[in-house]
Structures are given as C-alpha cells and as structure tokens.
Image: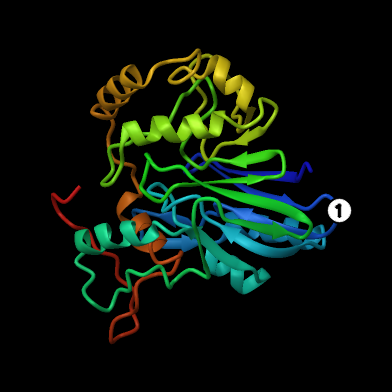
C-alpha cells in the first residue's frame, strides 16, 4: 500500500516533517515535528507546528501517531504541543534510554530525570510493527548517527530521519556521543535492502552544490546508484574512513544544547523552578 505523504520544510533548521496518511481512510501519523526556537532570545514559537495542525484539520484527519526517528540535535520537537492539539501517541526507538543516560550525565540532570523512556507513549524495538488505520508500519533500528535512530517503513515509503540524505548530499554525521560510522554503514545497507522502488523520505536537506531546489524524496534504487557516500557499492572500510574524516571538520549544530535537553524528554521542557521559570543548561566544554 502506498501512503499519502505531505511534507513541511522548516527553513530555519532545514528539517522536513511529514504527515503520513492511510490512503483508504482518515488516519495519519506525524513524523519529526518542529517547535520553533530562537536561540538568541530563548523564545519558542509554534508556527511550524501550527502549519501541520492546519493541514490535519483541513483534511479532517485523525492523528494516531506522533513519531520521532531519533533524538534530534538540530531542532526541538513539537510532539507534546501536537498531541495536546490533535491527540495521538508519541513514539520513538527503545534505545532512547541509552541516549537519556548519556545526556542525562552531560546535563547533570540528577535522579529526578527518568532515564527509562517513560516520557514517551511507545518505545519501538527493531522488528516491531504498528498500524496507521489500515496501513501497516514496520520499524527498523538503524543506529549510527545516534544509538536510537529508527527507520519507519510505512507501506512503500521509508522515513529514515538523518541516516540518509538526498543522493547528492550523502549520509549523516556520526561524531555525536554514541555515534558510529561503522554502525551507520551497516544500517544503511539494511535500508538499501528494501525494494528499489521504495520511496525514501529524508529528515533534512541542504541543497547540494549545483542543485537549486530543496528536495526530500528519493528511492532506494537512486540511493544505491548515486549516493555520493555509499552508492555504487562503496565498501565499509572506505566509507568509515571518509565519514570519520568528514565529521572531524564539522561544527556542532547551533541548537544542539537546547534540542537534546528537550527532545530526550519527548519534546517537554525541563521542570520549572520554584518561581515557575523554565531553564535550559549550557554545559561548558562537554561536547
């Protein structure tokens, strides 16, 4: 079955969010939502999420799932706001507990921060399946960019998060804590074992040199043939060498520190202090 997919591109973070709909009904899922955040002022805004809400309501859709492919390091999730407005269960991979343990220490969260994934409604394991109306979705654990990255194969479409980008841009970085270029290569091989006509929807696009338009949909066949990092049967060792050398030149994402604190809590802000103020931490020399 081929789901209907509506993409929402956030120019501030180059993130693509998706509404994935059962073509035979009104059920849908939202993948990788965005809460707007101005780093300089510390202010949030819901314009990006409101665009998704407006679409869902205009199409009279029923949200069953709000899915995260991983704990994003470049934007804040709007999952709780979407759930409040539209319903649905918030889901992520069950290795979120590894990420929570790692970054709970980085941000010195203390014992009050639960590291068991209980902030989410559903923790998916590799091989799990669920339904969006009559549309079956299968879950693949695809670590490498982070330990908890998941690919959701929904009908003939795969939502890969940051694991793969468009063929002319390549693959995700692997230098965050818990990342692994070798794991990423092996995860990508799993994705590329899907049928060649499987549609791949990526989590970001940055317009590779020479391309004028943003893009986010490709296929397994196109990735096999043309992905500049893993296409044309590139071997694992050369990929690992390339990926590690490239990652060593990359700066940290602008929103990594607020994003990790919020997203490991399923999009919730840290608990307010005694005055009711919400504070995000800025660890020094930790990443």
Residue for point 63% across, 28% down: 218
Please identify the residue farthest to the bottom as the structure is shown.
274
Can you see residue 78?
A: no
Q: Report whether 152 appears left or right of 253.
A: right
* Picture quadrant of residue 86: bottom right
Can you see residue 200?
A: yes
Q: Position of residue 24 (x, y in %)?
A: 86, 53
Q: Position of residue 191 (x, y in %)?
A: 54, 34
Residue count near mark 1 (Cα–Cα under 10 Å), binned few <14, some 14–19, many ≥20: few
* Picture quadrant of residue 279: bottom left
In the image, residue 99 sits, relative to residue 16, either above or below, namely below
Residue for point 37% across, 39% down: 144
In the image, residue 214 sits, relative to residue 93, either above or below, namely above
Q: Quadrant of the N terminus?
A: top right
Query: Which residue is tagged 1?
Result: 24
Residue for point 55% across, 20% down: 224
Secondary structure found at label 1: loop
Relative depth, front residue between 119 and 286: 119
Please identify the residue farthest to the front as the structure is shown.
127
Residue for point 43% across, 73% down: 118
Relative depth, front residue between 283 and 62: 62
């Amino acid at each position: 079955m081929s789901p209907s997919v509506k993409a929402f591109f956030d120019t501030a973070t180059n993130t693509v969010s998706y509404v994935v709909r059962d073509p035979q009904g009104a059920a849908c899922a939202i993948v990788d939502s965005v809460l707007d955040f101005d780093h300089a002022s510390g202010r949030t805004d819901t314009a990006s999420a409101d665009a998704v809400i407006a679409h869902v309501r205009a199409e009279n859709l029923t949200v069953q799932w709000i899915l995260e492919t991983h704990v994003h390091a470049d934007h804040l999730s709007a999952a709780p706001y979407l759930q409040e407005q539209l319903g649905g269960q918030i889901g992520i991979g069950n290795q979120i507990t590894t990420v929570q343990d790692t970054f709970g220490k980085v941000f010195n969260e203390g014992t009050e921060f639960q590291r068991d994934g209980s902030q989410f409604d559903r923790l998916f394991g590799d091989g799990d399946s669920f339904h969006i109306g009559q549309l079956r979705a299968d879950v693949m654990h695809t670590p490498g960019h982070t330990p908890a990255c998941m690919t959701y194969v929904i009908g003939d479409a795969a939502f890969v998060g940051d694991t793969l980008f468009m063929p002319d841009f390549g693959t995700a970085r692997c230098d965050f804590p818990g990342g692994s270029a070798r794991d990423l290569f092996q995860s990508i091989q799993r994705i590329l074992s899907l049928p060649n006509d499987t549609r791949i929807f990526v989590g970001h696009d940055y317009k590779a040199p020479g391309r004028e338009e943003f893009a986010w949909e490709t296929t397994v066949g196109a990735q096999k043939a043309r992905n500049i990092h893993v296409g044309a049967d590139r071997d694992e060792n050369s990929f690992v060498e390339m990926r590690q050398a490239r990652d060593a030149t990359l700066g940290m994402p602008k929103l990594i520190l607020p994003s990790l604190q919020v997203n490991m809590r399923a999009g919730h802000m840290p608990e307010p202090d005694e005055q009711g103020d919400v504070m995000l931490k800025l660890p020094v020399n930790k990443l």
